[in-house]
């Protein structure tokens, strides 16, 4: 049941990322627009409420202060439960950053006049800073709590870390990679719009079709590699669930499937990247844009290698325990 919820969550993320990417396509600040979410929307709502004047203006100010003080309120709640530690200071920094980010969202004219980045990139820069602070706080808290955690708690932490990695991979497949494809297609079309012969009626292949197809294939390979990495993570989540349930047989089966899927993902990533480079070499005369990449999706490769090695280690440890039991 939990597995279905993970799959549904990742599928919803993929649809959302693809929708936002297509919606922001053509904008010079497509990446920045994602970083400004949801601060731009909150700021627009507060501004509209404030412009109504009177009591609504006071209400807008109160809401602005309440939202900005949320991280500080979390710090106050944390201090009641335990002694504050060094990384908790980031919560105060988040409140300060949130005050500035929402102020910039409510007053876009001020942002354009006072900051070199202007309202196009200024708000996304502030939003990106706030996201970086949240990520830093989460990782530092994880490092501190993991040091004193028992086995079940460690599995819970690993589960959330794996879920975060899968979230990044889904974004890579339906967000960043798709955006890169759309940008490449737009650049290709604009750069060759003055030199596109009309040869549909001659039976010849249109001049940009091979290049467009190559770009699309490269995107599909990148997206498939990321999604295969998500499949490896889902198997790892099943393994953790089996260990929580005390089922060594199912855990061993999950470890075998992790090793198999990791190996398949590595083979696909390496061979597909080689194949698309080979296709570009063979079609070099027909292509208007060539990118012979020797780089690899290191995140997916590292994940699969780590999963493969850990799965094989678990299998060997279980085999060793079984041999020792037979010997005794």
Image (cartoon, rainbow, N blue to C red):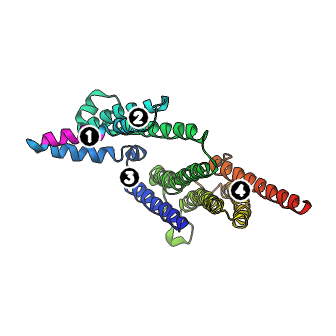
Foreground pick, 219 / 237: 237
Q: Earlier in the sequence, mark 1 or mark 3?
A: 3
Name the residue that disc number 1 marks: 66
In the displayed structure, does residue 168 sit left or right of residue 117?
Answer: right
The dominant secondary structure in magenta is helix
Q: Crowding at label 1, few (<14), some or many (≥20) Cα neighbours within 10 Å?
A: some
| Disc 3 and disc 2 in contact, CB within 8 angstroms | no
Q: Secondary structure at mark 4?
A: helix
Whether 63 is among the magenta residues is yes
| Disc 2 and disc 1 in contact, CB within 8 angstroms | no
Above or below, 186 relative to 121: below
Name the residue that disc number 3 marks: 24
Task: Tell us which disc is closer to us: 1 or 4.
Answer: 1
Q: Residue furthest right?
A: 327
Residue 21 figure quarter: bottom left
Q: Residue furthest left?
A: 54
User: Which region is colored magenta?
Assistant: 57-67
In the displayed structure, does residue 284 sit left or right of residue 169?
Answer: right
Give the distance between the C-alpha atoms of the residues marked 3 and 2, in whole angstroms. Answer: 41 Å
Residue at the image point whose x is 16% and y is 46% from the top: 49
Q: Crowding at label 2, few (<14), some or many (≥20) Cα neighbours within 10 Å?
A: few
Residue 53 figure quarter: top left
Task: Tell us which disc is closer to us: 2 or 4.
Answer: 2
Residue at the image point whose x is 63% and y is 58% from the top: 240
Give the distance between the C-alpha atoms of the residues marked 4 and 3, in whole angstroms. Answer: 32 Å
């Amino acid at each position: 049941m939990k597995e279905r919820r993970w799959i549904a969550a990742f599928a919803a993320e993929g649809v959302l990322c693809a929708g936002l990417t297509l919606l922001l396509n053509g904008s010079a600040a497509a990446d920045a627009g994602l970083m400004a979410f949801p601060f731009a929307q909150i700021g627009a709502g507060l501004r509209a409420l404030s412009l109504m004047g009177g009591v609504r203006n006071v209400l807008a100010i109160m809401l602005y202060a309440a939202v900005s003080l949320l991280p500080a309120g979390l710090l106050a709640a944390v201090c009641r439960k335990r002694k504050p530690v060094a990384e908790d200071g980031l919560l105060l920094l988040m409140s300060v950053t949130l005050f500035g980010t929402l102020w910039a969202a409510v007053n876009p004219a001020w942002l354009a006049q006072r900051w070199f980045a202007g309202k196009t990139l200024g708000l996304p820069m502030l939003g990106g800073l706030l996201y970086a602070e949240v990520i830093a706080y989460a990782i530092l808290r994880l490092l501190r709590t993991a040091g004193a955690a028992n086995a079940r708690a460690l599995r819970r932490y690993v589960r959330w870390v794996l879920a975060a990695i899968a979230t990044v991979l889904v974004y890579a497949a339906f967000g960043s990679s798709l955006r890169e494809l759309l940008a490449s297609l737009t650049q290709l079309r604009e750069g060759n719009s003055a030199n596109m012969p009309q040869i549909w009626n001659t039976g010849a292949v249109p001049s940009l079709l091979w290049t467009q197809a190559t770009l699309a294939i490269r995107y599909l390979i990148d997206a498939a590699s990321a999604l295969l990495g998500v499949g490896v993570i889902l198997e790892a989540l099943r393994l953790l669930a089996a260990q929580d349930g005390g089922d060594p047989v199912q855990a061993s089966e999950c470890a075998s499937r992790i090793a198999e899927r990791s190996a398949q993902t590595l083979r696909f990533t390496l061979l597909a990247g080689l194949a698309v480079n080979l296709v570009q070499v063979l079609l070099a005369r027909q292509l208007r844009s060539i990118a012979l990449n020797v780089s690899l999706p290191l995140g997916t490769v590292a994940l699969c290698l780590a999963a493969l090695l850990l799965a094989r280690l678990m299998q060997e440890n279980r085999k060793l325990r079984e041999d020792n039991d037979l010997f005794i």
